[in-house]
């Protein structure tokens, strides 16, 4: 029964209507690329640590060519930006770059099929190609494809994504990965169909100068007291406004924190369901906007990004490591990040944002190489430590992250010399993904879009809710309200 329901949803999604593909996701977790694929000097660590990691990593990949063996000669990877490509190029043993869209691993040619997420183009392209997978020539078959949390279930709840167990990857291999990263790519039958090299627990990044000016200290513990729950957060917003600061740039900054802490799914028994915590976001946000304590800017817009600079007068942004390291102008002279002016604290509630999952496409003729890539990039602790040190990413390995959290030689220049990893480690353990559904991307996007009308005074709450229901039912005609 489950397969019939899911297959119907996915097959419909993979038509021109794209039921489960929900518009431009460039402003969610992709414009920033969940880490912009480049290296950064934000994270510094003992050089010997990085050198040792690199040396041991090279040894770990000595059997890569053998793993590819007598399999296909072309490995096709489908993704939406350069992030995963850079991780492979920089860290996978034996990878040799040929040009911007290809490389080699042993005798296998690697082809990068990169389609940006704008206007849902990546999912549209992936869907169309997967539909032709069974009849495609061996060298044209998709071998690996990447997904994000907001639409992962669209793919893992079908036969297009292989169970990792079918590749020979065991529970023991993945024992040190964070559970939430497995939950996101586990299908309705409890079968794991993907892996990730990264975790994306979020924290609150605050403007240290503003904290000293308004709160009297930029110490993370002091700031945490001022944002420890939503009631306190909203009271602090008043204090910050009096000093000329917005507590966050936009109501959209807090949305994922609320939506990650719901107690029910967006769809229950075929009906659209608005969780109480989503309405808490609406009510709290409306008060903040009406009081002039934050704005309604769209994420990634110029107005939203103004707070990356001192003159923007924004106190905080919510996000994971990739946001502050790769998406908040840390490489730009004059920005807060460039001057090491951000700090990190837990904030009112734990949450996550983004992440990238590697799925093996059913029908791949490179199963051995796909398995090796998954194991090397998501379980090899030397490679994962190297990613932390060189790329300042938070990786999907408890041992590595807990060790790095205690490493006094590791710190973030962007965060003024702070080592935030213990904070991330604590946050990631509290994540509960039991309320994910295949409808999350569309419902989240349409809800924020509809509520903007309410926050700006262009619609009543009832009118905004009606806009939301209408938009969602148009996307998902199988639902009711």
Image (tube, rainbow, N blue to C red):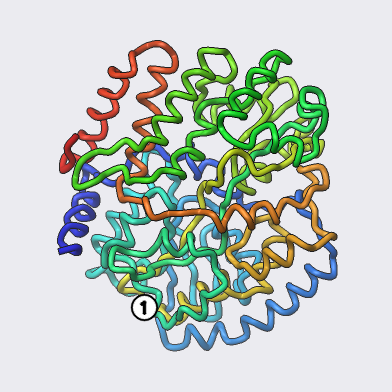
**Is residue 328 depicted above or below 413 in this figure?**
above
* Residue wearing tag 1: 365
Task: Tell whether 294 sits left or right of 114.
Answer: right
Choose between 71 and 92: the one closer to the eye: 92
Return the x and y of residue 160 as percentages of the image width and height: 29, 65
The structure residue drawn at horizontal position 55% and vertical position 25%, both measured from the top left corner, is 250
**SS label for mark 1:** loop
At 63% across and 44% down in the image, what residue appears? 203
- x and y, in percent, of residue 315 in the image: 68, 27
Q: In this view, does 24 lie to the left or right of 414?
A: left
Give percent across and percent down for residue 119. 37, 38
**Corner quadrant of residue 233:** top right
Question: 481 above or below 457?
Answer: below
* Residue at figure coordinates x 62%, y 85% from the top left: 62
In the image, 415 versus 347, the foreground residue is: 347
- Which quarter of the image is occupied by the C terminus? top left
Residue located 57% across and 13% down the image: 292
């Amino acid at each position: 029964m489950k397969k019939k329901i899911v297959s119907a949803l996915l097959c419909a999604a993979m038509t021109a209507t794209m039921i489960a593909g929900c518009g431009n996701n460039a402003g969610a977790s992709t414009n920033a690329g969940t880490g912009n694929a480049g290296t950064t000097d934000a994270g510094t660590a003992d050089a010997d640590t990085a050198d040792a990691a690199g040396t041991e990593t090279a040894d770990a990949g000595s059997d890569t060519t053998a793993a590819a063996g007598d399999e296909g000669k072309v490995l096709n990877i489908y993704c939406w930006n350069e992030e995963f490509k850079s991780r492979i190029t920089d860290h996978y043993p034996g990878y040799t770059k040929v040009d911007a869209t290809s490389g080699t691993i042993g005798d296998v040619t690697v082809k990068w099929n990169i389609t940006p997420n704008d206007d849902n183009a990546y999912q549209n392209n992936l869907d169309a190609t997967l539909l032709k997978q069974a009849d495609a020539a061996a060298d044209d078959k998709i071998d690996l494809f990447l997904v994000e949390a907001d639409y992962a279930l669209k793919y893992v709840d079908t036969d297009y994504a292989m169970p990792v167990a079918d590749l020979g990857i065991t529970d023991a291999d993945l024992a040190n990965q964070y559970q939430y990263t497995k939950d996101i790519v586990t299908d309705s039958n409890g079968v794991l169909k993907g892996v990730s090299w990264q975790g994306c627990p979020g924290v609150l990044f605050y403007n240290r100068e503003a904290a000293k000016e308004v709160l009297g200290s930029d110490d993370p513990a002091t700031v945490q007291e001022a944002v420890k729950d939503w009631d306190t957060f909203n009271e602090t917003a008043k204090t910050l406004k009096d000093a000329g600061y917005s507590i966050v740039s936009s109501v959209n900054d807090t949305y994922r924190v609320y939506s990650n802490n719901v107690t029910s799914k967006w769809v229950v028994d075929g009906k659209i369901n608005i969780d109480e915590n989503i309405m808490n976001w609406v009510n709290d946000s409306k008060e903040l906007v009406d009081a002039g304590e934050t704005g309604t800017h769209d994420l990634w817009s110029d107005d939203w990004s103004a707070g990356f600079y001192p003159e923007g007068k924004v106190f905080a942004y919510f996000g994971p490591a990739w946001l502050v390291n790769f998406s908040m102008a840390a490489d730009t002279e004059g920005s807060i990040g460039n001057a090491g002016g951000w700090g990190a604290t837990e904030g009112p509630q734990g949450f996550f944002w983004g992440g990238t999952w590697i799925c093996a496409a059913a029908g791949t003729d490179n199963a051995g190489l796909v398995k090796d890539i998954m194991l090397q990039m998501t379980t090899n602790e030397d490679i994962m430590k190297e990613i932390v040190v060189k790329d300042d990413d938070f990786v999907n390995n408890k041992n590595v992250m807990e060790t790095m959290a205690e490493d006094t030689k590791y710190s973030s220049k962007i965060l003024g010399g702070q080592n935030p990893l213990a904070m991330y480690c604590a946050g990631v353990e509290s994540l509960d993904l039991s309320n994910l559904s295949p409808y999350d991307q569309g419902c989240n996007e349409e809800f924020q879009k509809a509520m903007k009308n309410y926050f700006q005074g262009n619609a009543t709450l009832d009118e905004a809710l009606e806009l939301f229901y209408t938009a969602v039912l148009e996307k998902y005609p199988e639902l009711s309200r």
